[in-house]
């Protein structure tokens, strides 16, 4: 092996090539993940901040690779975005989640709602809207029970095409949520021009709220602003009862986080929902 250069280039290269080979390994394994049945949709309960009632869930993808073990979506989704695999993976999440909520609405006799994440790349599929509409038509559920979550990254990427797609989805009755609010660039402008029903405050603000009065002031401002624009607010990453209490005082609408539950398998979610709503 070569000696490390004075300026550390060798070390840098090693680190880069390690990262690259991990990426290549993930990409390779991801290509067969769908066919090998390695992907599973988990569901994290969403609750009413005021009374704790569970009314639905966010669908979160899990991948257990036979060769790589469990890989976090934070690691593999960006790679699937780059190579286009997100199109098929995204359709899998949509189809699985929509059929699941349909089944739950019958078996649990409840008007459950579910939120599904959409990646920027999925908006490049000219048939995206038609595909989503068909999935909902196939199952007897209402489009307004499906919420589609997008981040500001989607709005930056596609411009006119994305605006049109979101307007169409909204007209079809789907709910639209702006995810990770506060972490992007020009959030306020987006709120004016896009038909969002829900704003999700990023969990970093909720975490900082307890230790920083500035963060709490921001959360207060975001909630009030969203309400004045007729949007509902979801707080992400609610981990403590103190956070819950503050969010109640600030009239935040909904919450999600480890305080109530981590993401669950479909079976676990169903059991959880039954126990929550029988007492
Ligand atoms: P996200 O959409 O912001 O999802 C919320 C993340 O916060 C999830 O991580 C969830 O497990 C985690 N979380 C929930 N409650 C708490 C809490 O109380 N404390 C903390 N520290 N974390 C909490 P996860 O499941 O690892 O997903 C990471 C990201 O991967 C998601 O962030 C989303 O951007 C992406 N992702 C996951 N599933 C999908 C999918 O089906 N499609 C797309 N396009 N992206 C997905
Ligand atoms: Ca999300
Ligand atoms: Ca989020
Ligand atoms: Ca996030």
Image (tube, rainbow, N blue to C red):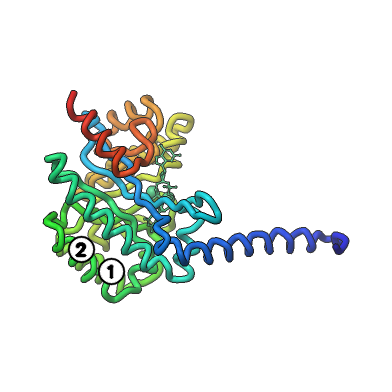
Answer yes or no: disc 2 within 8 Å of ligand 1.
Answer: no
Which residue is painted at 45% across and 59% down in the image? 77
The circle on residue 135 is 2
Residue 66 at least partly seen: yes
Which residue is painted at 19% across and 68% down in the image? 168
Between 111 and 231, the one nearer to me in the picture:
111
Residue 6 at least partly seen: no
Between 83 and 182, the one nearer to me in the picture:
83
Between 33 and 58, the one nearer to me in the picture:
33
Q: Secondary structure at mark 1?
A: helix
Q: Secondary structure at mark 2?
A: helix
Q: Quadrant of residue 131?
A: bottom left
Disc 1 target residue: 163
Q: Quadrant of residue 116?
A: bottom left
Check if mark 1's residue and mark 2's residue have beta carbons within 8 Å.
no
Which residue is painted at 39% across and 38% down in the image? 237
Give the distance between the C-alpha atoms of the residues marked 1 and 2, in whole angstroms: 22 Å
Q: Position of residue 98 (x, y in %)?
A: 23, 55
Q: Would you say 78 lies left or right of 95 here? A: right
């Amino acid at each position: 092996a070569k000696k490390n250069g004075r300026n550390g280039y060798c070390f840098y290269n090693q680190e880069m090539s390690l990262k690259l080979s991990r990426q290549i390994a993930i990409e390779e394994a991801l290509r067969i993940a769908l066919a090998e049945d390695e992907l599973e949709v988990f569901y994290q309960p969403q609750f009413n901040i005021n009374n704790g009632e569970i009314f639905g869930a966010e669908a979160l993808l899990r991948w257990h690779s036979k060769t790589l073990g469990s890989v976090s979506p934070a690691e593999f989704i960006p790679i699937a975005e780059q190579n286009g695999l997100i199109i098929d993976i995204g359709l899998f999440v949509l189809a699985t989640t929509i059929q699941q909520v349909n089944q739950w609405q019958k078996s649990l006799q409840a008007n459950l709602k579910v939120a599904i994440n959409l990646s920027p790349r999925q908006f490049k599929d000219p048939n995206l809207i038609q595909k989503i509409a068909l999935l909902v038509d196939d199952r007897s559920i209402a489009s307004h029970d499906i919420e589609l979550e997008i981040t500001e990254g989607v709005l930056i990427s596609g411009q006119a095409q994305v605006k049109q797609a979101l307007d169409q989805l909204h007209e079809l009755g789907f709910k639209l949520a702006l995810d990770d609010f506060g972490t992007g660039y020009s959030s306020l402008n987006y709120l004016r021009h896009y038909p969002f029903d829900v704003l999700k405050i990023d969990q970093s603000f909720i975490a900082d709220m307890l230790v920083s009065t500035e963060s709490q002031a921001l959360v207060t401002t975001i909630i009030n602003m969203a309400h004045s624009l007729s949007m509902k607010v979801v707080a992400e990453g609610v981990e403590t009862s103190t956070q819950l209490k503050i969010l109640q005082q600030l009239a935040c609408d909904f919450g999600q986080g480890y305080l109530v539950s981590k993401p669950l398998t479909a079976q676990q979610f169903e059991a959880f929902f039954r126990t929550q709503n029988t007492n």
